[in-house]
Amino acid sequence: MRVVNIRDKQTYYGAVDYLKGSLLLKAYNAGNSENTIDYLRYLLDQSPNQRLFLFWDGASYHRSHLVQNFLGEVNQDLSQEQWIKYMRPLCS
């Protein structure tokens, strides 16, 4: 992905699909709950039959009520083995 303007703030969400050996990268105007949920939906669309395991930094929007509610809705009808799982950092 090309840096549009090095003086402008740019936010990127990224994940590695280790089964396909690909990088799933998307640019956003900011890191926030809405963009996090949009990116999670993107990941689900890219890998509908795979479980997602996320390593997140300590960003507050990763822990927001909106994101937690979204994860609850997505995981609701799944067995615990199928949940989207995430790991918070050991130090934040």
Image: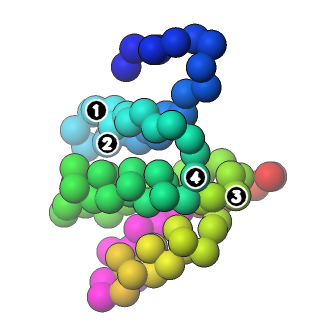
* Colour basis: rainbow
Magenta residues span: 77-86
Q: CA distance from mark 2 to mark 3?
A: 25 Å
Secondary structure category for the residue under label 1: strand
Please state the horizontal and vertical placement of residue 32, each as a whole percent of the image.
58, 52
User: Nearer the viewer's eye, disc 2 or disc 4?
Assistant: 4
Q: Which residue is mark 2?
A: 17
Identity, as a three-letter code, of the amino acid under mark 2: Asp
From the top left corner, tell me how far across and down residue 56 is, in percent: 59, 51
Residue 16: x %, y % from top left: 38, 39
User: Of tags 4 and 3, which is closer to the observer?
Assistant: 4
- Distance CA(mark 4)–CA(mark 1): 24 Å
Q: Quadrant of the N terminus?
A: top left
Labels 4 and 3: the sequence-earlier one: 4
Residue on which the image places disc 4: 32
* 59 left or right of 80 in image: right
Q: Is residue 13 left or right of residue 83?
A: right
Membership of 56 in magenta stretch? no
Q: Amino acid at mark 1?
A: Ser
Q: Check disc 1 and report the residue beneath it.
A: 22
Q: CA distance from mark 4 to mark 3?
A: 8 Å
Residue 26: image location, x then y, percent: 38, 36
Q: Is residue 14 above or below residue 88?
A: above
Q: Secondary structure at mark 2?
A: strand
Do the CB atoms of the residues marked 4 and 3 lie less than 8 Å apart?
Answer: no
Q: Few, some or many C-alpha atoms within 10 Å of disc 4 (few <14, some 14-19, many ≥20)?
A: some
